[in-house]
């Protein structure tokens, strides 16, 4: 425990380790101005509740033997300054000296170090009327464990990977068991809060961080308390390591808990129970984050654009008068249509942080003229009222065409020339392709336009239950869970009244991919050896992909070959991973309970789209089914029941499509 030196400044109060006083302080306050002038002060994490600075101190280091600060030309230790703003109840408690957040965090870290737990060393803490601070020494050559496992570990030689795979679970188990045995419960225990210092051909060093989230108990943690902490820690590893690695970790954890006496039978019971509750906790964790794309945060933002607001519309590109011409000829509207027709309309925008508003204004300007030419009757009056007035007047309302056309060109002759190919999908809307700047890089995108005709469709889209909103939410669901899919960057709602009339979804255009049917047709023309190796790996990855989707509680009712993409480079043998992706996320859902029957129907839909392909044999389908069962945790001995059920629902789907004259794609 440090013998703290009490330092009182003009507006602050500090406690600092004596050997660090001259290094950190200039009078009664930190050397902020000196560090800024030297360029060694850097903000590394910024959030409303916390601000973290890193200060590189050249020519100084802390000697662990003499516990003094010595000069050196080679050592450049870093210190970290965490700043907590005081707001609300925290301000009252700190003002009336009812609590001292940084002092408690400092004492926790020192207590853990005394108990032999490796963690950061605090060297100062202080406060003023608006903020509290804590200063800690940096740990040189350490990185977060999750980042190290995702990058450095994958680049190691295979022999070194095997060594680390055997050693790391034991080291983690010893660290966490010691923490629990001294009565420390970490409320934010995950791989990002554990630092690793890797030594080639030697044992890595592990450190616990974020000690402010630790609660100290008077006695070792019980199984109930330890289980909750192990669940928090194990969620990140569920899909990133093998089950044997997780079982090895828990086996060593039990052995290092010397205050427990657990038999092998109880250990197996605890292991199975811990695995199941960790999965349930992970699913609840993802469900709690599903509102993120509809909120303002560091990943997404929301805006509302009205044509009545001249300040907002002045940021947009010039409004061109375009004409929708099936022949592709350019015609000036000659004053027949102006932007006054859109007065009072509203654009609601949800977008990722990497796309700017100026890029979305380009889409809005183009969509405006698409709306004018396709659905001019909807510009001022919602569909429900127009239908009511048409019924009263005795003339039926105009309904959109149910057929789709392939190539309608929109061109403009105003300040600049614009040409895009509008693909009409009948009453559902259409889409066009363009290019946007996202995260500073040009990206080809597809703008999908969803026509909302009836009151039910408009209400559903307003409540984020319509097809465009479901696709926007499902894209985040997949990416948040680590699935590869086409990136969805923005969602736009156009409203001329209370309810949205059109929805525009902006998605990434994938060129280096073929759908599953095209991939199988390509493999059919390849030599036999290449065909067998590529197809077997593709079947295994596809089964694992659907197994992961179902294990995450997601259902994909439209799982047909046209919506499943495979990388072309994999089919040519250039890369080992097929990089499977799915499109058209309207059919993806997260039911309250994903039953076996729903999973069977998902697999039957995939089989129907490929039921007559000559490249796939019954053996390939059985290999897919068994790999799927292993990926979902089902026992492979139940494959006969699954086989019969999939065949039954496949026949029903084939008969239904033949009756309705629908293609089996």
Image (cartoon, rainbow, N blue to C red):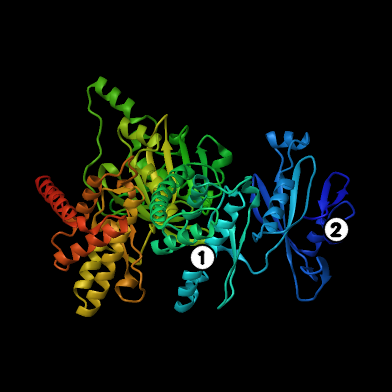
Residue 640 drawn at (x, y percent): 16, 56
> Residues under labels 1 and 2: Cα distance?
38 Å
Q: From the image, tell me which residue sits under label 1.
A: 170
Confirm whether residue 338 shows in the render: yes
On the image, which quarter does residue 625 sit in? bottom left
| Residue located farthest toward the right when viewing the structure as drawn | 27
* Upstream in sequence: badge 1 or badge 2: 2
Residue at image position (57%, 76%) is 202
Secondary element at tag 2:
helix
| Residue located farthest toward the top when viewing the structure as drawn | 392
In the foreground, 582 or 55: 55
Asked whether, in this view, residue 335 is left or right of residue 515, the answer is right
Which marked residue is nearer to the observer: mark 1 or mark 2?
1
Judge whether 185 appears above or below 455 on screen.
below
Position of the C terminus, as image quadrant, is bottom left
Confirm whether residue 43 shows in the render: no
Q: From the image, tell me which residue sits under label 2.
A: 18
In the foreground, 565 or 528: 528
Q: Residues within 10 Å of mark 2 (few under 14, many from 20)?
A: some
């Amino acid at each position: 425990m440090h013998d703290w030196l009490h330092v009182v400044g003009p507006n602050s109060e500090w406690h600092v380790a004596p050997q660090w006083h001259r290094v950190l302080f200039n009078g009664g306050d930190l050397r902020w101005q000196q560090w800024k002038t030297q360029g060694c002060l850097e903000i590394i994490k910024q959030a409303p509740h916390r601000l973290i600075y890193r200060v590189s101190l050249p020519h100084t280091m802390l000697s662990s033997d003499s516990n003094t600060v010595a000069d050196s030309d080679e050592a450049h230790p870093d210190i970290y300054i965490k700043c907590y703003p005081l707001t609300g109840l925290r301000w009252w408690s700190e003002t009336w000296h009812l609590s001292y957040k940084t002092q408690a965090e400092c004492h926790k870290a020192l207590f853990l170090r005394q108990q032999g737990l490796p963690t950061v060393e605090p060297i100062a803490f202080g406060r003023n009327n608006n903020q509290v601070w804590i200063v800690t020494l940096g740990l040189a050559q350490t990185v977060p464990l999750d980042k190290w496992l995702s990058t450095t570990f994958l680049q190691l030689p295979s022999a070194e990977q095997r060594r680390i795979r055997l050693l790391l679970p034991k080291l983690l188990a010893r660290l966490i068991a010691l923490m629990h045995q001294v009565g420390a419960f970490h409320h934010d225990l995950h791989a990002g809060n554990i630092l690793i210092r890797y030594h080639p051909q030697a044992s890595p060093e592990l450190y616990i961080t974020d000690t402010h989230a630790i609660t100290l108990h008077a006695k070792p943690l019980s199984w109930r308390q330890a289980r909750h902490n192990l669940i928090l820690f194990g969620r990140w590893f569920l899909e990133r390591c093998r089950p044997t690695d997780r079982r090895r970790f828990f086996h060593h954890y039990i052995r290092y808990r010397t205050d427990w006496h657990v038999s092998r039978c109880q250990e197996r019971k605890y292991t199975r129970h811990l695995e199941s509750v960790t999965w349930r906790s992970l699913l609840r964790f993802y469900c709690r984050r599903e509102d993120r794309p509809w909120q303002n945060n560091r990943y997404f933002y929301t805006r509302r654009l009205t044509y009545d607001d001249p300040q907002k519309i002045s940021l947009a590109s010039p409004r061109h008068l375009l004409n929708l011409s099936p022949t592709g000829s350019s015609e000036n509207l000659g004053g027949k249509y102006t932007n006054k027709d859109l007065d009072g309309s509203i654009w609601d925008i949800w977008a990722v942080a990497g796309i700017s508003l100026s890029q979305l204004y380009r889409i809005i300007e183009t969509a405006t003229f698409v709306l004018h030419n396709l659905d001019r009757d909807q510009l001022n009056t919602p569909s429900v009222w127009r239908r009511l007035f048409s019924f009263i007047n005795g003339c039926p309302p105009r309904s959109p065409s149910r057929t789709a056309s392939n190539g309608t060109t929109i061109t403009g002759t105003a300040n600049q020339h614009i040409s895009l190919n509008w693909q009409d999908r009948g009453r559902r809307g259409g889409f066009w392709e363009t290019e946007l700047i996202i995260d500073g890089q040009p990206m080809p995108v597809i703008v999908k336009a969803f026509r909302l005709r009836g009151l039910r469709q408009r209400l559903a889209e307003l409540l984020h239950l319509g097809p465009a909103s479901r696709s926007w939410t499902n894209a985040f669901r997949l990416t948040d869970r680590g699935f590869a899919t086409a990136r969805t960057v923005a969602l736009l709602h156009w409203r001329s009244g209370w309810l949205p009339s059109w929805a525009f979804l902006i998605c990434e255009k994938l060129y280096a991919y073929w759908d599953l049917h095209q991939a199988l047709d390509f493999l059919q023309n390849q030599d036999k050896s290449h065909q067998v190796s590529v197809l077997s790996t593709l079947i295994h990855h596809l089964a694992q992909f659907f197994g992961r989707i179902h294990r995450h509680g997601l259902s994909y009712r439209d799982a047909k070959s046209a919506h499943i993409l495979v990388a072309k480079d994999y089919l040519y043998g250039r890369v080992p991973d097929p990089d499977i992706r799915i499109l058209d996320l309207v059919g993806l859902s997260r039911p309250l309970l994903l039953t076996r029957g729903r999973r069977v129907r998902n697999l039957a839909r995939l089989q129907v789209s490929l039921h007559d392909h000559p490249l796939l044999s019954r053996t390939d389908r059985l290999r897919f089914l068994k790999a799927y069962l292993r990926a979902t945790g089902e026992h492979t001995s139940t494959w006969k029941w699954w086989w019969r059920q999939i065949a039954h629902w496949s026949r029903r789907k084939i008969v239904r499509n033949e009756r309705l004259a629908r293609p089996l794609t």
